[in-house]
Amino acid sequence: MNIMDKKNLPIAFFDSGVGGISVLREAVKLLAPEDFLFFGDSANAPYGTRPREEILRLTLAHAARFYQRGIKALVIACNTATSAAINELRRIYTDIPVIGIEPALKPAALMSLHPTVLVMATPGTVNGNKFHDLLGHYTDRADVIPLGCPGLMEFVENGDTDGPEVTAYLTALLTPYLRQNPIDAIVLGCTHYPFVAPVIRRIAGDAVKIFDGGEGTARELKRRLEQESLLRDSAHHGSVTFENSLPEKIALCKKLLTAGPDA
Ligand code: DGL
């Protein structure tokens, strides 16, 4: 395929569900002329409590389908799937940029002198080797507390981003940590969590800085497309197409894309 034809292909985004839209919305802001295809595997969610082999199998199967349809880049907008599958994906798809996401620990750990950083993520992410490697880079720069949050992504999947149940869940989860230590930063290490960031902000208070990897991932996508001369002409009006293994989630996807700002 020549480069002009390749430029016109969509950029595929993948998540276990609707959470990756927190990354997609950053990419849409940065890359308005591009066509985006977002697939969420809500029928198989959550991924974060599955064994690594299953997450790998599901992610590879969805990536293969995307690739056969024709895409110019693949964004794994899921920390859990990135942790389980990014190495294999990069080995298989060598002719397109394959971008993953990991908890934004770096900016949080470097924000001040030895801060205390709470990293919220799925059990799959906090127990994975990739996270342990990441942690190893920052243990002498910050006190890092990894916090697996089983059950949290389900609120977002059900469209509950601000109701009494999710507020009660987050209050019960976070209060013991906030009482025990002066927490300087919270890293949202799952792409579903930015949608509940305003609730986390209310519980944690204004002094705590909240980090997520969405914007950095979108910037990395732009950088890679530029590097490969794959950016579309600025005159093109970009589009976003949603697909989901549970088609009834599409209305929620559209709503989340235009959801208000984070905390
Ligand atoms: N959105 C995903 C992430 O970033 C995980 C949610 C799940 O458990 O499926 O980790």
Image (cartoon, rainbow, N blue to C red):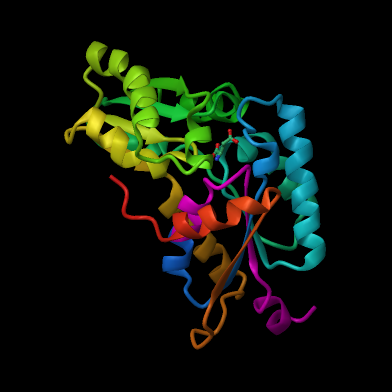
Above or below 32: residue 203: above
**Left or right side of 2 for 28:** left
The residue stretch that appears in magenta: 1-25
Q: Nearer the viewer, residue 173 or 106?
A: 173
Within the image, what quadrant is residue 208 found in? Answer: top left
Most extreme residue toward the bottom, as rendered?
235
| Residue for point 65% across, 70% down | 10
Above or below 93: residue 53: above
Is residue 210 among what the camera can see? Answer: yes
Q: Residue 181: give x, y in percent of width and height.
A: 25, 15
Q: Please check the rendered image and state whether residue 4 is part of the magenta-colored stretch, yes or no.
A: yes
Is residue 107 among what the camera can see? Answer: no
Within the image, what quadrant is residue 110 found in? Answer: top left
Most extreme residue toward the left, as rendered?
207
Q: Please check the rendered image and state whether residue 3 is part of the magenta-colored stretch, yes or no.
A: yes
Q: Quadrant of the N terminus?
A: bottom right
**Left or right side of 16 for 151:** left
| Residue for point 21% across, 19% down | 182
Q: Residue 232: give x, y in percent of width and height.
A: 57, 80
